[in-house]
Image: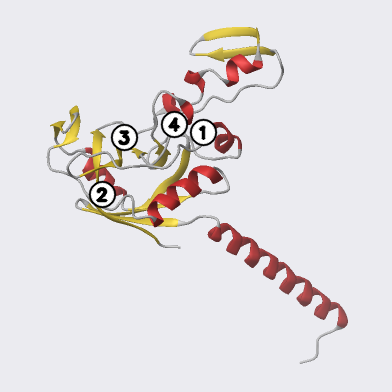
């Protein structure tokens, strides 16, 4: 069968479009590494997003590659809230960490990243926004109060509402640096094994090690955390 010149051009254009789409798909999948957690409660897989929170993802994946998480426990488990781990071994000895990672919660949210909703992965930290190191948590409910607060444009900011209160003509620096507005950086989500996470969240808890409560009575150990791609 002989194709006309017009048809050949259309076929070439379609082929080129398919190639571009294929490259875009490849770049999308390449930008979403996955990590498998093998735990004593079962296995689950998380997907992380370097396009949304690059420094946070790099930090997390380095801990994975360093085998930091292997042998650690989920030391804080609260049903209807979250499960947290990545910092303590089975004897509740705190593991040595690298320097903290810069907080990227607002940047990730502004780029279309997830909020702290069921199944998302976020960095744990102290009251200091830039204190996150190795510990992470998985939201097991929609925790809106953990979300970063985006600051409207302007300096001063003409109008800003927070927790039912309205602020007018507020210094931008004052809002940007307010600790309560930073929230928690979401950098990934559970893509398989959420049933395992749900089993974990329902574990009976009590005191353990240095913690007065919320510690699973039967330890939930991370046997390994492995980068899949």
Q: What residue is disc 3 on?
A: 82
Q: CA distance from mark 3 to mark 4?
A: 19 Å
Disc with the residue nearer the chain's start (3 vs 2): 3
Q: Position of residue 202 (x, y in %)?
A: 20, 38
Colour scheme shown: secondary structure
> Which marked residue is nearer to the observer: mark 3 or mark 1?
1
Q: Are marks 3 and 1 in contact (CB under 8 Å)?
A: no
Q: CA distance from mark 4 to mark 2?
A: 28 Å
Up/down of 32 relative to 101, above or below: below
Q: CA distance from mark 4 to mark 1?
A: 8 Å
Give the residue at x 23% y 37%.
75
Disc with the residue nearer the chain's start (3 vs 1): 3
Q: What residue is disc 4 on?
A: 131
Up/down of 14 relative to 149, above or below: below
Compare residues 194 and 92 and report the one nearer the observer: 92
Q: Position of residue 40 (x, y in %)?
A: 19, 52
Dot 3 lies on which element?
A: strand
Q: Position of residue 74 (x, y in %)?
A: 25, 41
Q: In screen coordinates, is 199 left or right of 115?
A: left
């Amino acid at each position: 069968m002989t194709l006309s010149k017009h048809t050949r051009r259309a076929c070439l254009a379609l082929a080129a479009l398919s190639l571009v789409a294929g490259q875009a798909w490849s770049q999308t999948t390449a930008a979403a590494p996955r990590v498998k957690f093998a735990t004593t409660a079962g296995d689950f897989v998380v997907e992380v997003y370097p396009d949304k929170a690059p420094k946070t993802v790099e930090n997390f994946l380095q801990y994975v590659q360093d085998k930091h998480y292997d042998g650690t426990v989920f030391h804080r488990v609260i049903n209807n809230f979250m499960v947290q781990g990545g910092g303590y071994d089975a004897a509740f000895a705190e593991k040595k960490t690298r320097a903290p990672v810069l907080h990227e919660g607002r940047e990730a949210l502004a780029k279309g990243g997830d909020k702290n909703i069921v199944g998302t992965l976020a960095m744990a930290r102290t009251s200091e926004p830039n204190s996150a190191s190795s510990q992470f948590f998985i939201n097991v409910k929609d925790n809106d109060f953990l979300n970063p607060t985006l600051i409207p444009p302007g300096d001063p900011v003409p109008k800003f509402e927070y927790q039912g209160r309205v602020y007018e003509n507020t210094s931008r620096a004052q809002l940007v640096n307010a600790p309560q507005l930073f929230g928690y950086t979401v950098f990934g989500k559970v893509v398989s094994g959420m049933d395992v996470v749900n089993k974990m969240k329902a574990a009976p808890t009590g005191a353990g090690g240095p913690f007065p409560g919320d510690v699973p009575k039967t330890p939930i150990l991370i046997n390994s955390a492995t980068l899949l791609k």
